[in-house]
Image (cartoon, helix red, strand yellow):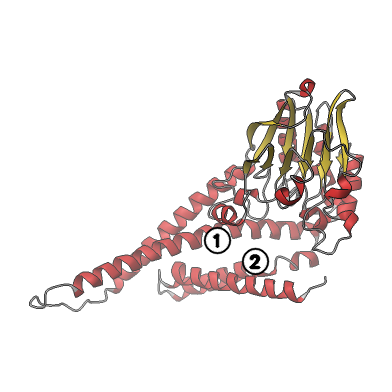
């Protein structure tokens, strides 16, 4: 495995954050709650093992048998989600305790000079009681949030239906419906059972066309072909179309393009196809992932809207499939794309990262409009990393095109 200086700095920084986070959790959940050496020793061992798991997940599983690596990967992602909420809960409750102490000190300081000032006595029993209460509330709150997040992540995605006026769409195609899946991330946690349920949901919507806007997989064809094979059962009048996301490049973009083609999925790599009858149709345009070129992939395997629209009549209605919402205003609008369907952001996936994503991405999730053109950014149908969905539920999108 080849590491660059940039990747080493990134992993080094993230490892330091992970270690410091686990040290902090040890102090608040174990050291402060009891003085018994066995309890504290157990805390050191547990937090040490979990920190090691999180800092080594990228390379250790590659050295182990597939089944063992899968179990460790699942444990790592589950703990990452729980640890996030534990840290938030402990930090929040600790902040309240600090604020309460500061207010108490201010009250004492503002006591009139004539009144006797009593020096505060440190009550170890009270301190330990507060530490245990804080730890107990933090564990309960984190467990509740994580439990709900896991339930929401593995349960059927919500169906969001939107109607979009598509410039140039023939009246005969008014009401044409597109079912969008995005960011499913079939892998160690999302497997065939989940995919079968998603396919059943899509078929029940009776769409005219199904599109998958990238990040379908997290693994090689040999590992995930069975789970992804559920796509064979998708039913729509005009078939299923796919464009690459950044995770396809981690998993073998060319191999997956060939595998999906064998499954009956049309892969659009910087090209367009005509949807509909000769007298009433629109162009479905597909581009490779926006970030592929910056990652060193050649132009023919990177975002190239010029190549995808070569030979297209610009007066015709067009729908663009592009994994990332990046470039919509700079490229898609100028190329005459009336609608772009994207994903990638997951809508932040779970609180508080949904707030971070909203601050970073101009088009973070949902429907946006500029002039006569629209972009819809899906929150994703599955999840990546921690199996959590809090304040950003997974979705299947049904887009109805209006003339």
Image quadrant where one finds the C terminus: top right
Real-space Cα distance between discs 2 and 1?
Answer: 11 Å
Disc number placed over residue 83 in the picture, else none: 1
The image quadrant that residue 207 belongs to is top right
Disc number placed over residue 54 in the picture, else none: 2
Seen from the viewer's position, the closer of residues 229 and 344 is: 344
Residue at x-position 11% and y-position 74%: 112
User: In the drawing, does residue 149 fall left or right of residue 384?
Assistant: left
Residue at x-position 66% and y-position 51%: 345
Vertical comparison of 376 with 131: above or below: above
The image quadrant that residue 66 belongs to is bottom right
Query: Label 1: how many residues lie within 10 Å, few (<14), some (14-19) or many (20+)?
Result: many
Q: Where is residue 110 in the image (x, y as percent from the top left)?
A: 18, 72
Vertical comparison of 21 with 319: above or below: below
- Local SS, label 1: helix
Vertical comparison of 382 with 200: above or below: below
Q: Can residue 296 be seen in this view?
A: yes
Q: Where is residue 356 in the image (x, y as percent from the top left)?
A: 56, 57
Disc number placed over residue 14 in the picture, else none: none
Q: Position of residue 147 (x, y in %)?
A: 54, 48
Q: Position of residue 308 (x, y in %)?
A: 87, 46
Q: Decide: marks 2, 1 in contact (CB < 8 A)? A: yes
């Amino acid at each position: 495995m080849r590491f660059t200086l940039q990747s080493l700095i990134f992993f080094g920084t993230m490892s330091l954050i992970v270690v410091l986070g686990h040290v902090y959790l040890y102090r608040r959940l174990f050291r402060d709650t009891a003085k018994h050496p066995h309890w504290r020793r157990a805390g050191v061992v547990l937090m040490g093992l979990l920190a090691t798991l999180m800092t080594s997940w990228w390379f250790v599983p590659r050295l182990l048998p597939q089944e063992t690596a899968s179990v460790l990967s699942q444990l790592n992602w589950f703990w990452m989600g729980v640890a996030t909420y534990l840290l938030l809960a402990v930090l929040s409750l600790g902040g309240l305790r600090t604020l309460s102490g500061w207010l108490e000190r201010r009250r004492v300081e503002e006591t009139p000079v004539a009144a006797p000032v009593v020096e505060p006595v440190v009550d170890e029993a009270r301190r330990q009681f507060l530490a245990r209460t804080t730890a107990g509330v933090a564990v309960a709150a984190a467990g509740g949030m994580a439990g709900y997040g896991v339930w929401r992540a593995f349960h059927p995605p919500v169906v969001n239906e939107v109607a979009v006026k598509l410039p140039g769409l023939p009246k005969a195609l008014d009401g044409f419906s597109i079912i969008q899946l995005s960011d499913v991330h079939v892998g160690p946690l999302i497997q065939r059972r989940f995919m079968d349920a998603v396919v059943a949901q899509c078929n029940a919507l009776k769409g005219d066309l199904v599109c998958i806007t990238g990040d379908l997989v997290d693994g090689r064809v040999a590992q995930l072909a069975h789970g992804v094979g559920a796509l064979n059962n998708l039913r729509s009048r005009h078939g299923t179309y796919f464009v690459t996301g950044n995770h396809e490049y981690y998993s073998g973009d060319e191999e997956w393009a060939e595998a999906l083609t064998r499954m009956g999925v049309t892969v659009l790599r910087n090209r367009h196809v005509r949807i509909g009858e000769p007298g009433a149709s629109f162009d479905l345009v597909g581009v490779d992932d926006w970030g592929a070129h910056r990652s060193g992939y050649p132009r023919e395997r990177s975002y190239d809207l010029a190549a995808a629209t070569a030979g297209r009549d610009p007066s015709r209605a067009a729908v663009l499939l592009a994994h990332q919402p990046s470039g919509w205003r700079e490229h898609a609008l100028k190329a005459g794309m009336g609608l772009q369907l994207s994903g990638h952001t997951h809508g932040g996936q779970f609180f508080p990262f949904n707030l971070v994503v909203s601050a970073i991405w101009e088009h973070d999730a949902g429907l946006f409009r500029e002039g006569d053109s629209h972009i819809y950014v899906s929150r994703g149908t599955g999840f990546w990393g921690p199996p959590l969905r809090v304040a950003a539920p997974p979705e299947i999108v049904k887009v109805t095109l209006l003339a």
